[in-house]
Protein backbone atom coordinates (compact mmCIF):
# COMPACT_ATOMS: atom_id res chain seq x y z
CA UNK A 1 0.00 0.00 0.00
CA UNK A 2 1.12 3.55 -0.74
CA UNK A 3 0.09 4.58 2.80
CA UNK A 4 2.60 2.13 4.29
CA UNK A 5 5.44 3.88 2.46
CA UNK A 6 4.64 7.28 3.95
CA UNK A 7 6.65 8.44 6.94
CA UNK A 8 4.79 9.43 10.10
CA UNK A 9 5.64 13.11 9.59
CA UNK A 10 4.36 13.11 6.03
CA UNK A 11 1.17 11.29 6.99
CA UNK A 12 0.50 13.76 9.82
CA UNK A 13 1.10 16.62 7.37
CA UNK A 14 -1.58 15.15 5.09
CA UNK A 15 -4.01 14.55 7.95
CA UNK A 16 -3.53 18.15 9.09
CA UNK A 17 -5.39 19.26 5.96
CA UNK A 18 -8.43 17.09 6.69
CA UNK A 19 -11.52 18.66 8.37
CA UNK A 20 -11.95 17.73 12.03
CA UNK A 21 -15.05 15.59 11.50
CA UNK A 22 -13.33 13.60 8.75
CA UNK A 23 -10.24 13.29 10.92
CA UNK A 24 -12.26 11.42 13.53
CA UNK A 25 -13.31 8.90 10.90
CA UNK A 26 -9.68 8.50 9.83
CA UNK A 27 -8.85 6.99 13.21
CA UNK A 28 -10.71 3.86 12.09
CA UNK A 29 -8.53 3.30 9.02
CA UNK A 30 -5.79 1.43 10.87
CA UNK A 31 -4.06 1.14 14.22
CA UNK A 32 -1.24 3.29 12.90
CA UNK A 33 -3.58 6.09 11.89
CA UNK A 34 -5.38 5.90 15.21
CA UNK A 35 -2.08 6.14 17.10
CA UNK A 36 -0.85 9.10 15.04
CA UNK A 37 -4.10 11.04 15.38
CA UNK A 38 -4.38 10.34 19.12
CA UNK A 39 -0.74 11.10 19.95
CA UNK A 40 -0.44 14.27 22.11
CA UNK A 41 2.65 15.44 20.20
CA UNK A 42 0.54 15.84 17.07
CA UNK A 43 -2.25 17.84 18.70
CA UNK A 44 -0.78 21.17 17.65
CA UNK A 45 -0.63 20.11 14.00
CA UNK A 46 -4.04 18.51 13.55
CA UNK A 47 -7.46 20.20 13.30
CA UNK A 48 -9.14 21.09 16.58
CA UNK A 49 -12.72 21.28 17.75
CA UNK A 50 -14.61 23.44 20.25
CA UNK A 51 -12.64 23.63 23.51
CA UNK A 52 -14.87 25.98 25.48
CA UNK A 53 -16.00 29.55 25.93
CA UNK A 54 -14.42 32.80 27.01
CA UNK A 55 -16.87 34.83 29.05
CA UNK A 56 -16.79 38.10 31.08
CA UNK A 57 -13.84 39.03 33.29
CA UNK A 58 -11.60 36.87 31.09
CA UNK A 59 -12.80 33.55 32.40
CA UNK A 60 -13.02 30.29 30.49
CA UNK A 61 -15.44 27.36 30.66
CA UNK A 62 -14.25 24.11 29.09
CA UNK A 63 -16.76 22.07 27.12
CA UNK A 64 -15.70 19.03 29.14
CA UNK A 65 -16.66 20.87 32.32
CA UNK A 66 -13.58 19.53 34.11
CA UNK A 67 -9.83 20.00 34.19
CA UNK A 68 -7.66 23.04 33.66
CA UNK A 69 -8.43 25.30 30.70
CA UNK A 70 -6.48 24.54 27.56
CA UNK A 71 -5.42 28.20 27.45
CA UNK A 72 -4.83 30.92 30.03
CA UNK A 73 -8.05 32.97 30.01
CA UNK A 74 -6.35 35.90 31.76
CA UNK A 75 -4.07 36.34 28.73
CA UNK A 76 -1.23 36.89 31.20
CA UNK A 77 1.32 36.60 28.40
CA UNK A 78 0.31 40.09 27.23
CA UNK A 79 2.48 42.94 28.58
CA UNK A 80 0.95 44.78 31.54
CA UNK A 81 0.42 47.86 29.41
CA UNK A 82 -1.60 45.89 26.88
CA UNK A 83 -3.81 44.38 29.59
CA UNK A 84 -4.99 47.76 30.93
CA UNK A 85 -8.77 47.89 30.66
CA UNK A 86 -8.79 44.84 28.39
CA UNK A 87 -12.22 43.89 27.01
CA UNK A 88 -12.89 40.82 24.86
CA UNK A 89 -14.98 41.89 21.88
CA UNK A 90 -15.12 38.93 19.54
CA UNK A 91 -13.49 35.69 18.47
CA UNK A 92 -13.16 33.90 15.17
CA UNK A 93 -11.52 30.55 14.37
CA UNK A 94 -9.00 30.63 17.20
CA UNK A 95 -8.25 34.37 17.30
CA UNK A 96 -9.60 36.87 19.84
CA UNK A 97 -10.32 40.54 19.22
CA UNK A 98 -9.73 42.77 22.26
CA UNK A 99 -10.06 46.46 23.04
CA UNK A 100 -7.62 47.98 25.54
CA UNK A 101 -8.63 51.28 27.11
CA UNK A 102 -5.96 53.54 28.59
CA UNK A 103 -6.51 54.52 32.23
CA UNK A 104 -4.81 57.88 31.65
CA UNK A 105 -7.30 58.78 28.93
CA UNK A 106 -10.48 56.67 28.69
CA UNK A 107 -11.03 57.85 25.11
CA UNK A 108 -7.73 56.33 23.98
CA UNK A 109 -7.69 52.64 23.18
CA UNK A 110 -6.00 49.95 21.12
CA UNK A 111 -7.26 46.86 19.36
CA UNK A 112 -5.36 43.62 19.83
CA UNK A 113 -5.78 40.38 17.90
CA UNK A 114 -4.59 37.51 20.06
CA UNK A 115 -3.95 33.80 19.54
CA UNK A 116 -4.15 32.25 23.04
CA UNK A 117 -2.86 28.87 21.82
CA UNK A 118 0.43 30.21 20.45
CA UNK A 119 0.52 33.20 22.85
CA UNK A 120 1.09 35.55 19.93
CA UNK A 121 -0.63 38.88 19.43
CA UNK A 122 -0.62 41.89 17.14
CA UNK A 123 -1.74 45.46 17.72
CA UNK A 124 -4.18 46.95 15.24
CA UNK A 125 -3.84 50.70 14.68
CA UNK A 126 -7.07 52.35 15.80
CA UNK A 127 -9.07 54.33 13.30
CA UNK A 128 -10.29 56.96 15.78
CA UNK A 129 -10.79 57.87 19.45
CA UNK A 130 -13.61 56.19 21.35
CA UNK A 131 -17.14 57.43 20.72
CA UNK A 132 -20.70 56.17 20.86
CA UNK A 133 -20.54 55.78 17.10
CA UNK A 134 -18.33 52.71 17.55
CA UNK A 135 -20.39 50.16 19.45
CA UNK A 136 -20.07 47.05 17.31
CA UNK A 137 -16.65 45.70 16.28
CA UNK A 138 -16.20 42.22 14.84
CA UNK A 139 -13.38 39.95 13.67
CA UNK A 140 -13.22 37.98 10.42
CA UNK A 141 -10.72 35.16 9.91
CA UNK A 142 -10.71 31.97 7.84
CA UNK A 143 -7.39 30.13 8.31
CA UNK A 144 -8.27 27.57 5.63
CA UNK A 145 -8.47 30.40 3.10
CA UNK A 146 -5.91 32.97 4.26
CA UNK A 147 -3.58 33.71 7.17
CA UNK A 148 -4.82 37.31 7.20
CA UNK A 149 -7.67 38.68 9.31
CA UNK A 150 -10.08 41.60 9.04
CA UNK A 151 -11.55 43.87 11.71
CA UNK A 152 -14.99 45.34 11.03
CA UNK A 153 -15.80 48.58 12.90
CA UNK A 154 -19.42 49.57 12.27
CA UNK A 155 -20.14 53.30 12.36
CA UNK A 156 -23.53 54.00 13.94
CA UNK A 157 -25.92 56.93 13.83
CA UNK A 158 -25.25 58.23 17.35
CA UNK A 159 -23.77 61.48 18.59
CA UNK A 160 -20.13 61.21 19.65
CA UNK A 161 -20.65 61.61 23.40
CA UNK A 162 -24.38 61.56 24.11
CA UNK A 163 -26.30 58.95 26.07
CA UNK A 164 -27.92 57.64 22.90
CA UNK A 165 -31.11 59.55 23.67
CA UNK A 166 -33.92 58.47 21.38
CA UNK A 167 -35.31 62.03 21.38
CA UNK A 168 -32.35 63.44 19.43
CA UNK A 169 -33.58 62.00 16.14
CA UNK A 170 -30.77 59.47 15.87
CA UNK A 171 -31.71 55.80 15.88
CA UNK A 172 -28.32 54.07 15.85
CA UNK A 173 -28.64 52.56 12.38
CA UNK A 174 -25.48 51.60 10.51
CA UNK A 175 -23.98 54.46 8.51
CA UNK A 176 -21.05 52.45 7.19
CA UNK A 177 -18.16 50.25 8.17
CA UNK A 178 -14.42 50.68 8.56
CA UNK A 179 -12.51 47.53 7.67
CA UNK A 180 -8.91 46.79 8.67
CA UNK A 181 -6.93 44.24 6.68
CA UNK A 182 -3.88 42.63 8.28
CA UNK A 183 -2.54 42.11 4.76
CA UNK A 184 -2.56 45.79 3.73
CA UNK A 185 -2.38 47.10 7.34
CA UNK A 186 -4.73 49.97 6.54
CA UNK A 187 -8.34 50.86 7.33
CA UNK A 188 -10.84 51.56 4.57
CA UNK A 189 -14.28 53.10 4.99
CA UNK A 190 -17.37 52.08 3.04
CA UNK A 191 -20.82 53.64 3.30
CA UNK A 192 -23.62 51.21 4.06
CA UNK A 193 -24.73 49.37 0.96
CA UNK A 194 -27.80 47.79 2.54
CA UNK A 195 -31.06 48.54 0.77
CA UNK A 196 -32.56 50.16 3.87
CA UNK A 197 -31.34 51.41 7.25
CA UNK A 198 -30.79 48.60 9.72
CA UNK A 199 -29.85 48.69 13.39
CA UNK A 200 -27.60 45.96 14.76
CA UNK A 201 -28.30 43.90 17.85
CA UNK A 202 -25.18 45.15 19.62
CA UNK A 203 -24.38 42.14 21.80
CA UNK A 204 -25.42 39.39 19.41
CA UNK A 205 -22.94 36.96 17.89
CA UNK A 206 -21.70 37.41 14.33
CA UNK A 207 -20.53 34.79 11.84
CA UNK A 208 -17.71 35.07 9.29
CA UNK A 209 -17.82 32.53 6.46
CA UNK A 210 -16.87 32.56 2.77
CA UNK A 211 -15.47 36.06 3.09
CA UNK A 212 -18.75 37.51 4.43
CA UNK A 213 -19.55 38.81 7.90
CA UNK A 214 -23.14 38.12 9.05
CA UNK A 215 -24.66 40.19 11.87
CA UNK A 216 -28.07 40.05 13.55
CA UNK A 217 -30.16 43.19 13.15
CA UNK A 218 -33.54 44.42 14.28
CA UNK A 219 -36.60 44.16 12.01
CA UNK A 220 -36.11 40.37 11.72
CA UNK A 221 -33.16 40.51 9.33
CA UNK A 222 -29.52 39.48 9.14
CA UNK A 223 -27.09 41.90 7.52
CA UNK A 224 -24.02 40.71 5.62
CA UNK A 225 -20.98 42.54 4.24
CA UNK A 226 -17.86 41.19 2.59
CA UNK A 227 -14.29 41.85 3.76
CA UNK A 228 -13.80 44.63 1.21
CA UNK A 229 -17.08 46.40 1.92
CA UNK A 230 -18.19 45.93 -1.68
CA UNK A 231 -20.94 43.31 -1.33
CA UNK A 232 -23.86 44.00 1.02
CA UNK A 233 -26.83 41.67 1.59
CA UNK A 234 -29.92 41.49 3.77
CA UNK A 235 -31.38 38.08 4.62
CA UNK A 236 -34.78 37.74 6.25
CA UNK A 237 -35.14 35.63 9.36
CA UNK A 238 -36.58 32.20 8.57
CA UNK A 239 -40.32 32.15 9.00
CA UNK A 240 -43.37 30.06 8.27
CA UNK A 241 -46.99 31.10 8.56
CA UNK A 242 -47.74 27.64 9.93
CA UNK A 243 -45.23 27.91 12.77
CA UNK A 244 -45.34 30.08 15.91
CA UNK A 245 -41.98 31.68 15.07
CA UNK A 246 -42.90 34.19 12.39
CA UNK A 247 -43.41 37.23 14.63
CA UNK A 248 -40.27 36.98 16.74
CA UNK A 249 -37.76 39.84 16.50
CA UNK A 250 -34.73 38.20 18.11
CA UNK A 251 -32.54 35.39 16.95
CA UNK A 252 -29.13 33.79 17.25
CA UNK A 253 -26.72 32.88 14.45
CA UNK A 254 -23.67 30.63 14.39
CA UNK A 255 -21.61 28.52 12.02
CA UNK A 256 -22.09 24.78 12.29
CA UNK A 257 -20.95 22.05 9.90
CA UNK A 258 -19.84 24.72 7.45
CA UNK A 259 -23.26 26.39 7.16
CA UNK A 260 -24.94 29.40 8.68
CA UNK A 261 -27.47 28.36 11.35
CA UNK A 262 -30.19 30.41 13.01
CA UNK A 263 -32.04 29.71 16.26
CA UNK A 264 -35.06 31.47 17.70
CA UNK A 265 -37.96 30.84 20.01
CA UNK A 266 -41.70 31.06 19.60
CA UNK A 267 -43.37 34.31 20.61
CA UNK A 268 -46.11 32.64 22.65
CA UNK A 269 -44.56 31.11 25.75
CA UNK A 270 -40.88 31.00 24.78
CA UNK A 271 -40.70 27.23 25.21
CA UNK A 272 -40.14 25.87 21.72
CA UNK A 273 -36.77 26.55 20.12
CA UNK A 274 -36.23 26.09 16.40
CA UNK A 275 -32.92 25.67 14.61
CA UNK A 276 -32.74 26.52 10.92
CA UNK A 277 -29.92 26.09 8.39
CA UNK A 278 -29.15 28.19 5.34
CA UNK A 279 -28.49 25.40 2.85
CA UNK A 280 -27.70 27.75 -0.02
CA UNK A 281 -26.36 31.22 0.74
CA UNK A 282 -27.22 32.44 -2.75
CA UNK A 283 -30.87 31.40 -2.65
CA UNK A 284 -31.29 32.60 0.96
CA UNK A 285 -33.57 29.64 1.57
CA UNK A 286 -33.80 28.44 5.17
CA UNK A 287 -34.58 24.84 6.10
CA UNK A 288 -36.04 23.94 9.49
CA UNK A 289 -33.58 21.47 10.99
CA UNK A 290 -34.66 20.94 14.60
CA UNK A 291 -37.43 21.95 16.97
CA UNK A 292 -37.21 21.13 20.67
CA UNK A 293 -39.12 21.95 23.83
CA UNK A 294 -36.82 23.11 26.59
CA UNK A 295 -39.78 23.02 28.96
CA UNK A 296 -39.80 19.25 28.56
CA UNK A 297 -36.02 18.83 28.66
CA UNK A 298 -35.16 20.98 31.67
CA UNK A 299 -38.40 20.58 33.58
CA UNK A 300 -39.32 24.24 33.81
CA UNK A 301 -42.76 25.67 33.08
CA UNK A 302 -41.54 28.75 31.27
CA UNK A 303 -38.36 29.37 29.33
CA UNK A 304 -37.72 32.93 28.22
CA UNK A 305 -35.48 33.43 25.21
CA UNK A 306 -32.92 36.23 25.35
CA UNK A 307 -33.30 36.98 29.05
CA UNK A 308 -31.80 35.74 32.32
CA UNK A 309 -33.50 32.35 32.34
CA UNK A 310 -32.48 31.03 28.94
CA UNK A 311 -29.80 32.34 26.57
CA UNK A 312 -28.40 30.49 23.56
CA UNK A 313 -24.64 31.10 23.43
CA UNK A 314 -23.31 28.80 20.70
CA UNK A 315 -23.84 25.93 18.31
CA UNK A 316 -21.24 23.20 18.05
CA UNK A 317 -19.08 23.62 14.92
CA UNK A 318 -19.30 19.92 13.95
CA UNK A 319 -22.32 18.48 15.75
CA UNK A 320 -26.05 19.12 16.05
CA UNK A 321 -25.63 20.57 19.52
CA UNK A 322 -26.76 23.85 21.08
CA UNK A 323 -25.13 25.47 24.12
CA UNK A 324 -27.17 27.70 26.39
CA UNK A 325 -27.18 29.35 29.81
CA UNK A 326 -30.18 28.53 31.97
CA UNK A 327 -31.54 29.36 35.42
CA UNK A 328 -30.90 31.93 38.13
CA UNK A 329 -27.46 30.44 38.80
CA UNK A 330 -26.49 30.63 35.13
CA UNK A 331 -25.83 27.00 34.34
CA UNK A 332 -23.92 26.51 31.10
CA UNK A 333 -25.59 23.52 29.43
CA UNK A 334 -25.58 21.61 26.17
CA UNK A 335 -28.40 19.97 24.27
CA UNK A 336 -27.78 17.29 21.66
CA UNK A 337 -30.51 18.06 19.14
CA UNK A 338 -30.43 14.54 17.72
CA UNK A 339 -30.77 12.57 20.95
CA UNK A 340 -32.37 15.24 23.13
CA UNK A 341 -29.73 14.67 25.82
CA UNK A 342 -29.08 17.70 28.03
CA UNK A 343 -25.90 18.07 30.10
CA UNK A 344 -24.80 20.62 32.67
CA UNK A 345 -21.28 21.76 31.84
CA UNK A 346 -20.67 24.31 34.57
CA UNK A 347 -22.50 26.53 37.05
CA UNK A 348 -21.26 30.02 36.25
CA UNK A 349 -22.89 31.94 39.10
CA UNK A 350 -24.39 35.40 39.28
CA UNK A 351 -21.64 37.41 37.57
CA UNK A 352 -22.32 36.05 34.12
CA UNK A 353 -24.10 37.55 31.13
CA UNK A 354 -24.75 36.56 27.57
CA UNK A 355 -21.40 37.63 26.07
CA UNK A 356 -19.77 34.26 25.34
CA UNK A 357 -17.01 33.70 22.79
CA UNK A 358 -16.71 30.10 21.54
CA UNK A 359 -13.08 29.05 21.24
CA UNK A 360 -11.49 26.52 18.88
CA UNK A 361 -7.69 26.40 19.40
CA UNK A 362 -5.50 27.38 16.47
CA UNK A 363 -1.90 26.21 16.68
CA UNK A 364 -0.74 27.37 13.26
CA UNK A 365 1.40 30.47 12.94
CA UNK A 366 -1.48 32.68 11.87
CA UNK A 367 0.09 35.80 13.39
CA UNK A 368 3.49 35.45 11.78
CA UNK A 369 4.46 39.04 12.54
CA UNK A 370 2.99 39.01 16.01
CA UNK A 371 4.59 39.55 19.39
CA UNK A 372 5.22 36.71 21.79
Image: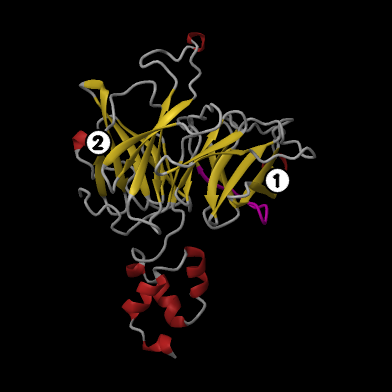
Q: Which marked residue is nearer to the observer: mark 2 or mark 1?
A: 2
Mark 1: few/some/many CA within 10 Å (<14, 14-19, 20+)? some
Task: Give percent across and percent down for residue 251.
Answer: 60, 36
**Does residue 315 appear in this view?**
no
Q: How many labels does the image show?
A: 2
Task: Give percent across and percent down for residue 186.
Answer: 27, 40
Q: Residue lying farthest bottom?
A: 1
Q: Is residue 204 above or below residue 7?
A: above
Locate residue 215 relative to residue 101 in the image: left or right. Answer: right
Task: Give percent across and percent down for residue 317.
Answer: 52, 54
Taking the spot 33% from the left edge, 58% from the top edge, the residue there is 363
Q: Is residue 335 magenta?
A: yes
Q: What stretch is highlighted in magenta?
A: 334-346
- Front one among 199 and 357: 199
**Does residue 29 appear in this view?**
yes
Q: Disc 2 marks which residue?
A: 125
Task: Give percent across and percent down for residue 324.
Answer: 56, 41
Secondary structure beneath dot 2 equals loop
Q: In which quarter of the image is residue 219?
A: top right
Locate residue 42 relative to residue 358 in the image: left or right. Answer: left
Most frequent secondary structure within the magenta stretch: strand
Q: Disc 1 marks which residue?
A: 292
Amino acid sequence: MVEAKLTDDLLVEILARVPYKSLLRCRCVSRRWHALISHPDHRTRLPQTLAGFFYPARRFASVSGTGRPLVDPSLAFLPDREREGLVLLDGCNGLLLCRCFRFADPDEFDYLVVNPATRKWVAVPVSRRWSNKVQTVRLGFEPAVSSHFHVFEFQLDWDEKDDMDEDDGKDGHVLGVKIYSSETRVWSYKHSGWSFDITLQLDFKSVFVNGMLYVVATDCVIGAVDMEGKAWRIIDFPRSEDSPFHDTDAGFIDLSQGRLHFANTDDIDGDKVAVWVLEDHDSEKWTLKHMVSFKHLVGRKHVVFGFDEFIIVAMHPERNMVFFVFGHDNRLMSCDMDSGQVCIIRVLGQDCNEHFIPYVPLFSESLADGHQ
